[in-house]
Amino acid sequence: MPLDSHTDARVSPLHLGAVPAPPYRHLFRLSDDTGLFEHARGPVPKRWHGYCVDDVARGLVIVCREPEPASPLVGLAERYLSFLLHAQDKAGTFHNRLGYDRVWHDEPSLGDWWGRGVWGLGVAAGRGATPWIRAVALERFGRSAHLRSPYVRAMAFAALGAAEVVAVDPEHEAARALLADAAAMIGGPAADPEWPWPEKRLTYANAALPEVLIAAGQALGDAATLEAGLEMLGWLVDVESHEGHVSVTPIGGWRVGEPRPGFGQQPIEVAALADACNRAFEATSDPRWLAVVQRCVAWFLGDNDSHLRMIDSTTGGGFDGLQEHDRNPNQGAESTLAMIGTLQHGRRWSDSAEIA
């Protein structure tokens, strides 16, 4: 049973109200002097599960995206950046899992966490609230930017960081090269109009792939790559919509012929879609992309397949997953950050506006 069923019961999509300000209180609850705890039981951090670069990097992205962060948020950015510096080795790869005993439980490598680490560094280099955050993050971004992962999503995450660096330094050669190589690895839409996706099935962080193409097209002046990204994203939006609301790919993935909607929907998938459509709107000024960003906000407010709010209004946390008749009551870092990041976009474009 949801922990706060008295406040977050099923809601009608017709009564969503204005976009709320992103709540940070649960993020502070999940953070300590080392980093950001990965998991929670309800809103209570599971310290014994420790920390991971995946979530700390996401945290750095989110707090650096705040346009006017208060000093406590700047402190979080410094803490998260320090964690990434500790995780990065001299070659530019990253550890991922740090135990509560402050011991790394893996070896540095080029998995998704490397890509997210580079993403976090890139955002901090471009948008960090203080000169020293920006300077240190840019230096450490350079340590990793020459590497190439064999995994397409790791490359996509790293490329999103590279796009942030290129935005403030258009001639940064390593960032431009990383962005171009990631776009080439993703490729364009496939020839089959019923399945133009470049993979055999949708899996996770799907929207990051077209977002990279859009970012590369913008940054590198490549109109064809930009158009390919917009085409892929448009198809994904159609596939991840149901009866006028967002209905993202569930755990386990999806392809044509499998049931929809699927459940075990993860907030991070909604956030990835919001990120990509936000970038598409910035690139084109086409209001259809902004409408999808608004629908992503609405998903958290209850306009989803189960008509359940995915924000705990008491704790400020985000619930970990949407099921057909309920939701996962736990409020881990990934889901909370996904919720905050989506609300950031909603607040930016429609401050105090009604969700369409």
Image (cartoon, grey):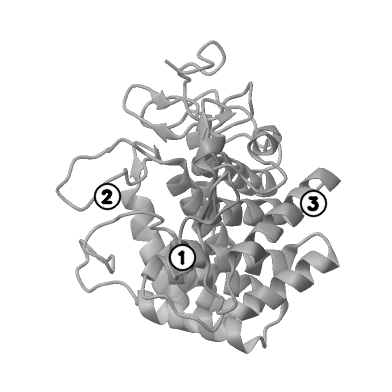
* In the rendered image, the vertical position of residue 354 relative to residue 219, given as above or below: above
Residue 113 appears in view: yes
| Front-lying residue, 116 or 343 | 116
Residue 305: percent from the left, percent from the top? 36, 31
Q: Secondary structure at mark 1?
A: loop
Q: The C terminus appears in which quarter of the rendering?
A: top right
Residue 221 appears in view: no
Real-space Cα separation, disc 3 to disc 2, in angstroms: 36 Å
Residues at discs 3 and 2 in contact (Cβ within 8 Å)? no
Residue 15: percent from the left, percent from the top? 54, 23
Q: Please give the label number shown on residue 253.
A: 2
* In the rendered image, the vertical position of residue 149 relative to residue 342, given as above or below: below
Tell me which numbered mark, 3 or 2, is placed earlier along the sequence: 3
| Front-lying residue, 256 or 338 | 338
- The amino acid pointed to by label 3 is Val
The answer to whether residue 233 is left or right of residue 275 is: left
Labels 3, 2: front one:
3
Q: What residue lies at 36% left-to-right and 65% top-to-bottom?
A: 232
| Front-lying residue, 54 or 336 | 54
- The amino acid pointed to by label 2 is Gly
Residue 87: percent from the left, percent from the top? 59, 63
The answer to whether residue 356 is left or right of residue 265 is: right
Residues at discs 3 and 1 in contact (Cβ within 8 Å)? no
Q: Please give the label number shown on residue 107.
A: 1
Residue under label 3, please give it: 74
Choose top left, top right, bottom left or bottom right for residue 259: top left
- Crowding at label 1, few (<14), some or many (≥20) Cα neighbours within 10 Å? few
